[in-house]
Amino acid sequence: MPGPGNEVIGQEEIQELLDVMKSGYLFRYGSLDDPKYKKKVYILENEFARYCGVKHALAVTSGSAALIVALKAIGLQPGDEVIVPAYTFVATFSSVIFSGGIPILTEIDESLNIDPKDIEKRITPRTKAIVPVHMLGNSCDMDTIMAIAKKYNLKVVEDACQANGGSYHGKKLGSIGDIGAFSLNIFKTITAGDGGLMITNDTDLYKRAFGFHDQGHSPSRSGVEVGQRNILGLNFRMNELTGAVALAQVRKMDDIISTLRSKKAKLKSAIADIPGKKFRTLNDPDGDCATLCTVIFEDVAKAAQVAKKLGTTTVDRSGWHVYANMEHVNHWLAERNLPHDKGAYPQTDDILSRSVNLTVGVVDAGLGASFGINIHSTDEEIDIVAEQFREVYS
Ligand SMILES: *Cc1c(COP(=O)(O)O)cnc(C)c1O
């Protein structure tokens, strides 16, 4: 069982998909006069932009593609430094590297997101951008991050791949910085199997991103625009099949999130009184996607013992999202004499060694999240899980 969107796939997705299949036309561009052209990707972009309260959305093939397109749009040059958290999915690092930049790893705080206090220490004359990652469905401290970006004239690309539908002080995540990036892989809030979305309020950035995602063309082209292509691009275009499923899923986002929020609130209150632990800091509790519930213990040994008894692991030992466990990234950093081995980010190591992720809507052993509840859990099942946690703890 992966993310919540995947769990609620139903008639709506089937209908949208059949609409495309029956037309027999699968490419994202077409003629508006042609009844075969169902423009699902186009509608998806418009609805998602409206959902996020921004001017532009661009559909792409993955969250990684959304990040690369975003970094290209802001004009990242070879050797530019990009500030990223030490706790994130590998794609945050690799998208910076494949865009020609150098990821500069930064400590996290007890929100499990990038620590703004550590950001300023990492800024150099080569710093071009900050990529705050809204990990596990929750916002970074965006007010402080945006103030730092303004002070040093840096671009902000929000990696909202794990936080689609979340918000911060009333604004949708991804809409606060210059560009926001989202993923539609099956572990995320909503899914189309794979796929991605990018949003921005800046029309110039949108045009650059669009061109980069489609061989230099401008938005909504109907033909090949020989003579008018200003930038060199690649192909990260979404097809109509993916667009159809993603469209049905976007329309389910608010239901998914409100369901998860009520289940998470029940789980949290059932274990709130247990001493020796706290919950992860939420920079805006009202904007939580509620896909996961992170418990932070006072004691490292206690955290490890509880995790083991629950059949899961502390976050530092989950394979996928912790800098020290990414040997492929670490080889790259080591060749450039950049800090990488376990111990290089002691504050991050300490917090993650005391953290356990309980599942709410996302079940992903790669996040150290294999124990907890899911989007279908009944009140009774939530009580059982809370009781198991209590027993193991004492
Ligand atoms: C999932 C994820 C991505 C990449 O998404 P893909 O669609 O798998 O390419 C990027 N960053 C973070 C933080 C993610 O969790």
Image (spheres, rainbow, N blue to C red):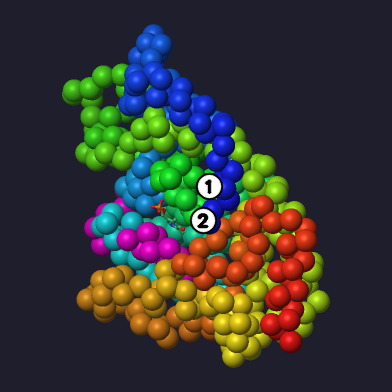
As drawn, is 266 to the left or to the right of 197?
right
Q: Is mark 1 within 8 Å of ligand 1?
A: no
Does the residue at mark 2 contact the one at mark 1 (Cβ under 8 Å)? yes
Q: What residue type is labelled 1?
A: Asn
Above or below, 203 relative to 373 = above
Q: Along the line of sight, which residue is nearer the eye, 56 or 62?
A: 62
Above or below, 207 relative to 339 = above
As drawn, is 276 to the left or to the right of 48?
right
| Stretch of the chain drawn in magenta | 75-94
As drawn, is 167 to the left or to the right of 365?
right
Task: In the rendered structure, find residue 156 and report the number of the disc placed on it.
Answer: none
Q: Along the line of sight, which residue is nearer the eye, 248 or 141?
A: 248
Q: Where is residue 182 in the image (x, y as percent from the top left)?
A: 47, 48
Above or below, 316 relative to 73 = below
Task: In the rendered structure, find residue 2 and report the number of the disc placed on it.
Answer: 2
Q: Which residue corresponds to the image point at 24% horizontal and 35% vertical from the top-left?
A: 215
Q: From the image, which quarter does the C terminus lie in?
A: bottom right
Q: Mark 1 points at which residue?
A: 6
